[in-house]
Image: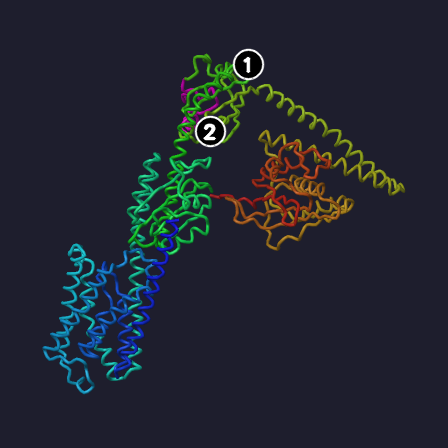
Amino acid sequence: MSGQADKRHWYQNTTLHRSLEWLVLLMVLMAALWAGTRTEEAPQLILLTTLTIITINFSLPPEQGSVGLVPLVSVSSLLIVGLETAVFLLGASIVLAELARPLWQPLWEYVDVKRPSWKQRLMADIIYLLTLVIAGKIYLEMGGQAPLVNDGIDNLDWSLLIILAVLYGIIYFLLSALMWRLMRKALKAFLGENAISVITVGMLVLPFALLGSLTYMRNGLPFFVIYMMGVTVFAVVIWLSWQRRFILQRQLAQFSALNRTGTSLRETLELEVVLERTQALVSELVPVDQFSISLIDIEGNWNTPEKPDDFTCWVAENGRLLDTDYRNIHYASRHNLTPPDPHPNAWLGIPLTAVDRVIGVMVLQRHPPHQPFSYWHRQVLFAIAGQASAAIENARLYSETLRLYNLTDKALAQRIKQLQALVNSMQEGVLMIDTMGAIVLINPPAAQLLNQDSAAMLTQPLHPPMAAPLGFSESELQSLLIALQNNQFPSEQQVEFKTAQNRFILRVETAVTAAAGQTIGWLMLFRDITEERELAERRTDLTRMIVHDLRNPLTTLSSTISLLKGQLVSANVNSSDTITDLLQTADMGVADMLDMVDSLMDINRMEAGQDVVDAEAMHLPPLAEQVVMQLQPLAQERGIHLHFAPPPAALPAIWGDREVLRRVLINLLDNALKFTPAGGSVNGHFRPDLPAAPHYEPGIICIIEDTGPGIPPEAREFVFDRFTRTNQEGAPIRGTGLGLTFCKMAIEAHNGRIWVEDNPQGGTQFLFSLPGSPIFDVT
């Protein structure tokens, strides 16, 4: 109960203090207005008083030499209303400016500089008063005119005005230097940083003050009001310019410190060192009375002897910044939060996050007389919190890595014992190394590749000279060992190699992970595939023999059908349409079979490295029209629209084999017709291929697109492989699975390229490029 009473008493005192400030300000302003209206000079007095209040509040702080336009307004008052009135006016304005300070407090929110204390403000006000009194007295004693009058303007003694300017500047400079020393700052710093600006303000006030006075005397009050507005705007602009320059300088300095400390944090993986360096950085950039970092483990428990206060827990639970001070801390009870005891003047909590998880809270507190944290303070602390979060998480991961590494050694030893018995019975060779390159698992078949004993090789390092028996070059094995030592694990891969005994071995490699998910080694499996390769070669030889032997009977059958058709025509036999259609169908079927056989034979020749292309300069669109006419009956029978768009007028010629390219077009169009449903369409078009391939004229690109179900992305890599047939809808399809293989090899034999893309309108696009005529070097 006593804590709640103290809190209410504190809040009531703060509210009462502010209310009294505004009440006194209002009463003084009303009194000043009433006093000003008792004289004929009321308008100019009110204007000068208002302008003095504004220039006092928009003067630069003591750290910048208290530079502002107060001297200008003071000298203007001297020349307009005389010394005594000017001194009284300046004194009254100082009091009113002090009372009006709450009006200007928001302007300091974004300026990270200590606000002037009442002693510093008092010293600055004394400088203004003493400078005006001393310089004005001397000026009047020497016969100077103040206030100025219209009749005496033409007879002004300019030398006295120059003396006034020099006197004012010297006195203002000396008193400013004295104030600097009273603030216990080095005079050298004042002379280096602020002397020029102070002297400039002191010396140059007279011309502008004289301008204001003459404006008032010559042109009256309206023009004098305009002059005052200009001075006001100029004072505000000076203050804002300083504010921006100061903020920029402070930000550059803080960014430099952040960069240095960020590098320092990244250099260590010790958690205690990270926390110490974070605290040092905060103390350097933001003045605080209390600083702490409370960490949370992965289970959500606090790593502190006692649970933190309610404010800290709220920041951790919500993952949001909490900034409270003496002006709003009393609202904590509405959210069931108990403020720290004793109440700080300002409390700021920032969450430390890593991978969308709060890992701790950074807490900063200020006690009286320190002010609340500014906007820039929060921005700087956010940056520090980000760097600290990464460093803390790295330090934690490093500690966890060390712990897991120790567990890994034990787990690895246990697994090796269990696996050794199993791998010794395998026919495949098994070889495993740890991250340092030492052999931790090997069975007799793998040791046989190295011509060594398996038991003797355990724990021995895998040296680069052992590379050749394992299918590596020395540089490849060395790169692998270096990568493993740096915790860089290559992706799983398969490699075939030939041993010195003319055996073909398939090596499969992959990383080995422990139960916790960390990588503990690199596993290599060696399988003898010599017999598989021999069987594959025999199968290929048998296919070639069958294909070669099929051509002769097919040729004979084709010739027989052609003779039969010729006999019917020459004998003038009135055959029925059915017989003619049957002969035509048989002829087309035999032609298709011959194309298939020729394609298989060409595939075998191209795989053997033989050249099957008899190229010449040709235009591809006419050949495409012939193929479309040939396949049009099949398209009409299936209800599919088959069309090849007219080529562009400037489509270049290509360098190709007409017969081979005819079969390529037939295979691609027939393939599109297979997968296009009734009502769909198969379309083709050409476009120039620019730029031209080296040593060739510009070529063309042919695009054949259908509206079928499309080819899955994962199937596009092997769609051109032998005996591959894909159907996304799962329905049975006809074909041997060799058409696209022939197309790929034939196009590449023409120095072209073929690939698959999605059709924007749905379905698939097959595209192939062919170069133009070769450029022969006649030199």
Residue 735 in which image quadrant? top right
Q: Is residue 700 above or below residue 720?
A: below
Q: Is residue 172 above or below residue 486?
A: below
Q: Nearer the viewer, residue 487 or 411?
A: 411
Q: Amino acid at mark 2?
A: Gln
The residue lying at 78 percent from left, 45 percent from top is 637
Q: Which residue is mark 2?
A: 518
Residue 582 located within the stretch drawn in magenta: no
Residue 479 located within the stretch drawn in magenta: yes
Q: Nearer the viewer, residue 52 or 508?
A: 52
Q: Secondary structure at mark 2?
A: loop
Task: Give the magenta-colored segment's residue range.
Answer: 460-482
Q: CA distance from mark 1 to mark 2?
A: 28 Å
| Magenta span main SS | helix
Nearer-N-terminus badge (1/2): 1
Q: Are marks 1 and 2 in contact (CB under 8 Å)?
A: no
Q: Residues within 10 Å of mark 2 (few under 14, many from 20)?
A: few
Q: Is residue 648 above or below residue 33?
A: above
The x and y percentages for residue 542 are: 67, 23
Q: Is residue 244 left or right of residue 417?
A: left
The x and y percentages for residue 692 are: 52, 47
Q: Which residue is mark 1?
A: 425
Q: Is residue 165 left or right of residue 584?
A: left
The x and y percentages for residue 238 are: 28, 66
The residue lying at 76 percent from left, 35 percent from top is 590
Q: Residue furthest front?
A: 1
Q: Nearer the viewer, residue 78 or 273?
A: 78
Q: Nearer the viewer, residue 597 or 468?
A: 468
Q: Amino acid at mark 1?
A: Ser
Q: Is residue 92 above or below residue 215?
A: above
Q: Is residue 663 left or right of residue 347?
A: right
The x and y percentages for residue 641 are: 73, 49
